[in-house]
Amino acid sequence: MEAGANRPEITATTGEVLERLMIEDQDKKKERKRSSARKR
C-alpha cells in the first residue's frame, strides 16, 4: 500500500476498482449471451 501511495496515477480507489470489475463482469456476460445466440 505504501509503495502505491506516492503514485496516485497508478493506484485507483477501491470504488473505482470494484466499478471496473463490475463493468468487466457485465461485458463477459454480454459476450456469453452473444456467443450462445450465435450457436443457436
Image (spheres, rainbow, N blue to C red):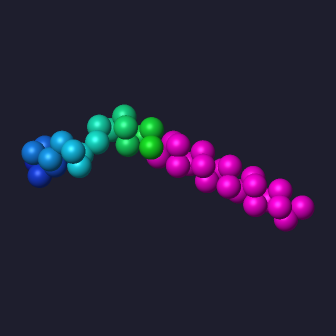
Left or right: residue 14 versus residue 4 is right
Q: Where's residue 19, x and y in %? A: 45, 38
Q: Nearer the viewer, residue 23 or 14?
A: 23
Which residue appears farthest toward the front when viewing the image? 9
**Is residue 39 placed above or below 24 in the rendered structure?**
below
Q: Where's residue 27, x and y in %? A: 60, 49
Is residue 25 located in the magenta-colored stretch of the structure? yes
Which residue appears farthest toward the top when viewing the image? 15
Image point 70% across, 56% down: which residue? 32
Q: Where's residue 26, x and y in %? A: 60, 45
Left or right: residue 33 versus residue 25 is right
Magenta-drawn segment:
21-40
Q: Where's residue 30, x and y in %? A: 68, 49
Which residue appears farthest toward the bottom when viewing the image? 39
Image point 75% across, 60% down: which residue? 35
Left or right: residue 20 versus residue 36 is left
Image point 68% across, 55% down: which residue? 31
Most frequent secondary structure within the magenta stretch: helix
Quadrant the C terminus occupies: bottom right
Is residue 28 located in the magenta-colored stretch of the structure? yes
